[in-house]
Image (spheres, helix red, strand yellow):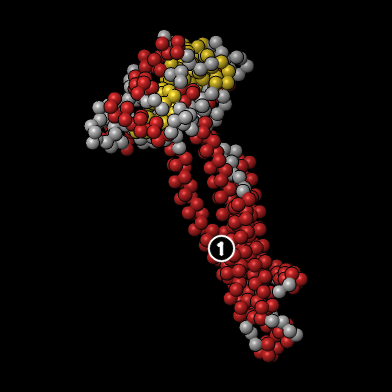
Amino acid sequence: MSRAEIAENFRVALDTLRARKIRSGLTVLGIVIGVTSVISIASIISGLNGYIRTRVESMGSRTFFVSRIPFGMGPGRMPEKIRVRKYLMDADAAFLRESCPSLAFATAFASRIDFTQMTDNVRYGNEQVERLILRGAEPDYSRAIPLFSVEHGRFLSPDDLDHSRAVAVIGAAIAEALFLHTDPLGKVVRLNSRPYEVIGVFEHDPGMFGGLGVDQFVIIPLTNFRKNYPAIRERFLAVSVREEAEMNVARNEVIEAMRRRRRVAHNGENDFEIADPDFLSNLWDQLTGAMVLLTGIISSIGLLVGGIGVMNIMLISVTERTQEIGIRKAIGARKSDIRVQFLLEAVTLSGLGGVLGVLFGGVIAFAVRTLAPSIPATLSVFWVSLGVGISVSVGLFFGYYPANRAANLDPIVCLRYE
């Protein structure tokens, strides 16, 4: 079939759809719903994947975290074999620095973050901020986790650590709340009723999806934290791998050193946990995998309904246009011409649904990005192409049977049809 014949059949298909606007619109509704769900969810997940990758890099792409208990496990769900583990020590970081050639540095830190039992507060004058995260850290902490980058002032120094100085680096939101029109550097705040000098302010970071971020942190020297909060024994280690070293080699060195340090039997399980730099990405991939599967099921149902609708309307169209088919065959139309005509109508119908689905999906993604900036939905060319391609494939698959049925009709029977 020539290009001119295909163009003519395409125009005939459009004329047929325009003549039956309401019926055509209802037919493509299932395809529109299926493609819209695919495009909107895929856009949201695509944007979030990029956001998570950026977030992981800001947490230190070559940093491991060592802890006594698995990350994300609450105390209420902790099995006994984990509860009885020995606590990590501040000195473990120095031991790792000396024992692991692949490490650039290792640093210990501790936190007060249980809002239900321990509510921290910081005051300056008449202003007060509550529900903050108080953390004791060492000077290398900001190098291990680049997310904690100081915008004004400085971070903790070795001298602050050695002398257990009462100095603090605060989050940008805390600084704005306490010092609206004043430079916070050098000012003395009262952190849980104790005086601390503000030596630095972190760069603005509202947190992941609007949750707790660096904005809500106050960081003091770990030695000062240990002195004022001796009841908090939980420690975490952040170890950074040298640029030229392999991550797997460094990880094995850390495991070996920690097992020696904690005197774990050669055939015993590790009594500590190591979180890889991409543990957050892996967790996110598991969550989005389930979401993609659910979206695929929902969109498949919509596309199936839409495809059945396309087949139904095409069968009705074949019945309604039986005489037209007979006339076309009588003046020389071949089976292939009839088949292509009806296939083009089915593809045009489903393709229109796919285009509308892409547009609606794009509108939803834009609305989500505008109303919830923490969810950076991004419409990609891949998903747009896939949405249109799926809709066209549905038209070809479900439109072939009606088209083939029309092509095989007897022209004499068609001309006698009323």
Tell me if I can see residue 351 in this picture: yes
Toward the viewer: 54 or 366?
54
Determine whether 33 is above or below 375 in the image.
below
How far across and how far down the image is residue 40, in percent? 58, 50
**Most extreme residue toward the front, as rendered?**
244
- Amino acid type, mark 1: Leu
Toward the viewer: 58 or 96?
96
Q: How many marks?
A: 1
Toward the viewer: 363 or 95?
95
Question: The N terminus lies in which quarter of the figure?
Answer: bottom right
**Label 1, residues with CA under 10 Å away: few <14, some 14-19, many ≥20:** many
Q: Which residue is mark 1?
A: 303
Toward the viewer: 390 or 365?
390
Tell me if I can see residue 320 in this picture: no
Q: Secondary structure at mark 1?
A: helix
How far across and how far down the image is residue 272, in percent? 32, 31
Q: Is residue 216 left or right of residue 250?
A: right
How far across and how far down the image is residue 263, in percent? 25, 27
